[in-house]
Image: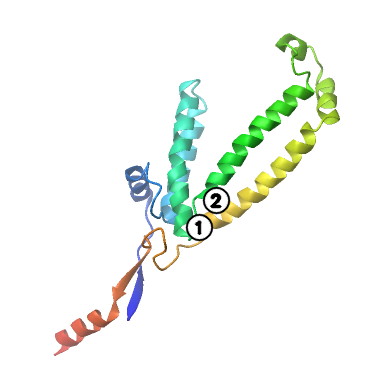
Amino acid sequence: MRELTVLPQLGFTEALSAACKKVTQFKGRSRRSEFWWTYLAVFIINFICSFIPSIGTLISILLGLAMIPITFRRLHDTGRSGWWYGVSMICGTIYIIVACSLVIAALGGGASAADLSSMSSEEIVEALMEGPAMGFIGIGLLAGIIYGIILLIFYCQDSQKEENKYGPSPKYVEENADAESQDTMQTMA
């Protein structure tokens, strides 16, 4: 008979150490504590970097890219494919490209920066409302929010207790209860 032992939650430094060792590893599983402590550290660093022109943006982009593998592993830990997150990244990129194209087309397509800067905010809003840009942007934002909430729920779920197709549980460790009871009986004798 096998029993599961729950390993203690990772602390801040343990979680960051584990995440840094696996920064390019998409395979395997990551516990909630590893994911959320790393996410907090990246959030704080991004906040600080937002005050540093140019280099801060580059650091934020690199940290965002570094979060992709840990996000995949977090989803693996709940028994889901990392592509739940990958699809959101791909769809988000396509959404931004199409939305920007629609906005540019609505504002006059070939208009120069000088032409656009001379437009009042009311004229810009009116131009956007006449075309499909606002509808597409609104529907896309709503879909993104709903999908984001679904992903957040997945990130907050507990680890699958048993080994899944992505590997053994980093939180729940199987122990052989029969061997332990035999050891106990031998020490009692």
Determine the residue positioned at 74% across, 14% down.
Answer: 110
Residue at image coords 39%, 51%? 27
Q: Residues within 10 Å of mark 1 (few under 14, many from 20)?
A: some
Q: Is residue 57 above or below residue 144?
A: above
Residue 163 rendering spot, x and y as whole percentages: 39, 65
Viewer-nearest residue: 88 or 11: 88
Q: Where in the figure is residue 102, as x and y percent of width and height?
A: 74, 28
Question: Can you give x and y, in whole percent of width and height, for residue 87 in the image?
Answer: 57, 45
Q: Residue at x 49, y 39 (%)?
A: 43
Task: Name the secondary structure under disc 2.
Answer: helix
Quarter assignment of residue 104: top right
Q: How many marks?
A: 2
Decide if residue 26 is on the left or right side of residue 85. Answer: left
What label does residue 80 carry, if any?
1
Asked if disc 1 and disc 2 are in contact, CB closer than 8 Å, the reply is: yes
- For badge 1, the amino acid type reads Arg
Q: Position of residue 48 (x, y in %)?
A: 48, 31
| Left or right of 138 on screen, residue 63 | left
Which numbered tag is attached to residue 103?
none
Task: Name the image quarter holding the N terminus.
Answer: bottom left
Instruction: Using the rendered view, name the quadrant where residue 2 is placed.
Output: bottom left
Q: Residue 103 versus residue 178: which sits nearer the camera? A: 103
Label 1, secondary structure: give it: loop
> Within 10 angstroms of label 2, few (less than 14), some, or many (20 or more) residues?
some
Image position of 43 with respect to 5: above or below: above
| Residue 100 quadrant | top right
* Residue visible at 36% across and 62% down in the picture: 168
Residue extending farthest to the top is: 114
Q: Vertically, is 155 above or below 115?
A: below
Please, which colouring scheme is shown? rainbow
Q: Say which quadrant the C terminus sits in.
A: bottom left
Residue tagged 2: 84
